[in-house]
Every structure is written in structure tokens, then in C-alpha cells.
Amino acid sequence: MNLAALLIRAARARPDSLALAQGLEPHSDYRTLADRAAAIAGSLRAAGLKPGDRVAIAMKNCPEFIELLYGVWHAGLCAVPVNARLHPNEFAWIFGNSGARLVAVTPDLADALAPVCDGLPDVERMLVAGEAEFRTLYDGERIGLADVAPTDNAWLFYTSGTTGRPKGATLSHRNLMHCTLGYFSDVDDIAEGDAVLHPAPLSHASGCYSIPYVVRASPQVIPHGGFDPEEIFELIRHYRGSSFFAAPTMVKRLIDHPAATSADVANLRSIIYGGGPMYVADAKRAFELWGPKLIQIYGQGECPMTITSLRREEIADVDHPRYEERLASTGRAFSNVEVRVADTDERALAPGEIGEIQVRGEVVMNGYWDNPEATAAALRGGWLHTGDLGIMDEEGYVTLKDRSKDMIISGGTNIYPREIEEVLLTHAGVSEVAVIGRPDPEWGENVIAYVVAAGGRPDPDALDRHCLDHLARFKRPKAYRFVEALPKNNYGKVVKTEIRDLEAAEADP
């Protein structure tokens, strides 16, 4: 089933209902959104794009993002939504690896990405949202819905890898449909007219959660200021049944905002959080302020939004004898997947034993784009190997303990130390380096680099500039610790547990 069929269905059922808004300003109804998607599809096919071709969407959140996403699907093409905060080098890798033939950007990225696109042989055009050439997409011949197989790729989700190169998780129309069904079965229901706000990037979780709201022909609201707590409170006051996806750091900023205790949240339906650990104290504080509004999900790009969920009733059940243990968990498996904790020999472990969290079901990706070796490793034995370590208790609640891949989650964004280490090792003043995450009450984790200098100690500002020349700003270390040597085991491998102990002593002397 083509996901764009959901938009056609919504437009037939409720053509005059608000589909998209920018802040408090209406942008389009469902009749208009479906019409534009069909026109965009016609324009893309007339430009020579064929079913299965990739279209990269490098945009900050805006109505055009959703218009283009559904136009791409209507045409039978594959969308490649890209985090708008990446470095040009990272954009270049994703555009090139995916073989994107067309790149769409927002004006703030145009100057930086024009030379990137010019340097890639597969990219034929770069369109800038709001400019005349982009608007010609709306003038295309309205074509019929492309016939796609359920396993055809709909979305390439690029997720950072331990080798420093992002891998493209291939998500099919079937995968995203099962993600959508999982939303209704294990996350939340949507009443007619309920609105979804999109303060989190549409290139990630918030984009996946646009689909259930199309199913219900409900309003989708793009804030003007990204994530600005004052604007979020204003939008909640204005839109009935408001829900949104948020990283735990966003929830933290909301509960710490001066308006948190006085804001009118009568219209707030749900805050669905994930992408990093939520401190128990923060979850309790949100419940005290706003009542049973929080819902937690745990997923990965390879299994979007759909591994475990902790429902609002469980978060609100403060009298349960194991309340805090539940609150510290990520909940139980979604209804449409199987989840297990397994050892290194692929054997399921008993409740309470630590192992790797694995999942299988129709929502799990087809594999990694053009990377059969990584696909075979991730999907061996028919299970997605998440790389996350955790336990499952007797009731099925899963609690994350550590990440076997040493991934850092800062502000809800995955950061892999190896990627930063490789960049820092290209600096003449760095002999060895190990990057870890340090717990932070606002961001979840901060990036810290332990550096063995090559000769004299390099200037931290110079290391910062070096990182910013190669990486997105949010991946830059927040601090550099200069040491004589890195702790290593008998095989010469750096022992990061000892480095984390050093950092804990640094933070709490």
C-alpha cells in the first residue's frame, strides 16, 4: 500500500479540515494538501524521476516538508529526509550514498549546500523552498497514485554508525504502516480534530508521527521557532487535543520554564517522549504539573518508534509498588513486535539478566542501503540487533542499562564517539583520543573527549575549530581532558569504563 493513499483517503473524508498550519496561521486544508502532493508527484515524474529514485529533503520544519514528502510517495519515489543540523560534509555523504537525484532545502541551508550538490554527479537539481523554481512543483500535472509494492522503499533513514559513516536504514511502505498501526495500538488514540505539533525534526520521529494524523485527517502544526517553550504553550492553548513528540531534554526545558506552573494546558493531550533517557524526577515533575500526559516510546531508525512503550496509565500509576522501577524502564513490547534480551550466543535470557535487546516484526527495516555486510550483521538470525544492553523483568518491562556501541544521546540526537574520535585524530596535536558521554540533567549527555597530546598540549579552541570544520556543531565535545595515557586492556583496547570512572571523579571530586 502506498502511504500517500492515506492522504487521498483523508482528503475525501474531510476535504475542508485543516491539514497544515504554521504557528497560529492556517496553511492548507486536506483537499489542498492532497492536490499539491499529486501535482508535486506529476512534476517529479515529468522531470524524469522514476519509481524508486531518491529525493533528499534537507529542510528545517516547514509545511513544504510534508507537502514534498507525500508528493514523493505519491510518485512512487523514496524520500531521504536529512537532519537539517548536519555539517556540509555529512550532507555530502548522505546525498552521494543514497544517489539522490533531487535535493530540496530550506533557504537557511541553500548557500552551504549549493556547492555540495554541484559536486555530486547524481544530483540533478537543488530546489529551495519558497523560491520560484520550487513553487513550479505545484503546477505539475496531477497524476494518479503510483502502484508500489509493500516492500518498496519509502524512507531512507540515515543513522550514524560506529565507523563514522551514517548508514541508510531502508524503511518500506509496510514498515511505516506498521509503525502507524503501532501508534494507535500502543501509544495513543487521536480524536477527530486533535492536533499534532512538530517542534522536533520532521526528518526523524516527528515525521513518522505525521502519518497517524493524516489517517485521522487532523491538523499538523509547524511552530515558527522550532522548540520554543513559550510558543509551545501558546500553541497548546490554541489547538484542541494537542500532542507532540519530544526528546527528554525538551520536556525538561518545558517543566523548567517559568510559565510551566501557570500555562493553560487544558488542550494538552499527550507528550510522547523518546530518543534518550528521561530522569525519573523529571517525569514525576511533569506529572505533578500537567497530570497523565506523558507517554514513553523506545525505538531506533531501524525499527522506527516501535520497540517498547510505557503508556500514560503506567506513568500515572503512582501507587503501584514498583512505580519507580516502571518509570525508569522503557515499558513493554509493542503489540506488533517481538522483543527479547539475548546473550552473545543468540540465546534468550531469563528475566533480570543483562543482554542485548533484539526485536523482530513487520516494522523492522529491510536492511541498510547498499551495505549488505552491515545488513547481515544487524539482522542475523531474523532479529534486529539494537546494540543496546538491558534487562527484561518478569512483567515484560525493558530497562536500558548501557549501549554496546558506546552511543551518546544528547538532546535526543544519537552521537557516536568513533566519528568524533576519527576527526580529532586528524589534528596534528592529537596522538590518541577517547570520547565518552557525561550525564547532563538538561541534555541527557554531553560529549567529553579524553586526549593524549602529540608533543605540546593543543589549544582546546583549535580542537573546537577542527571539529566544526568536519562535524555538526552539536557533536563537538563540550570539554577536553588531557591525559598522559588512555587506560587499555591486555589487547591494547581502550577501556572506556575506566574513562567514565575518571569523568565521574572529575565531576564529583
Image (cartoon, rainbow, N blue to C red):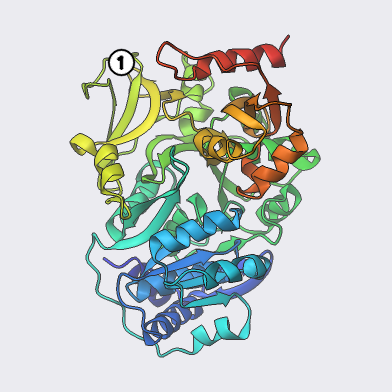
Residue sitting at x 49%, y 17%: 495
The mark total stands at 1
Give whichever of 108, 229 is nearer the camera.
Answer: 108
Residue 160 visible in the current orientation: yes
**Looking at the picture, which amino acid does disc 1 mark?**
Pro
Image quarter of the C terminus: top right
Give whichever of 327, 495 is nearer the camera.
Answer: 495
Q: Position of residue 178 (x, y in %)?
A: 31, 51
For label 1, the crowd category at 10 Å Cα-Cα, with few meaning under 14, some 14 to 19 and many 20 or more, is some
Q: Position of residue 239 (x, y in %)?
A: 63, 59
Up/down of 416 relative to 224, above or below:
above
Up/down of 350 relative to 339, above or below:
above
Label 1 element class: loop
When asked about the image quadrant of residue 413, the answer is: top right
Give whichever of 234, 198 is nearer the camera.
Answer: 198
Q: In the shown orientation, is residue 184 left or right of residue 281?
A: left
To which residue does mark 1 refer? 351
Residue furthest to the front: 455
Residue sitting at x 65%, y 37%: 428
Up/down of 296 relative to 201, above or below:
above
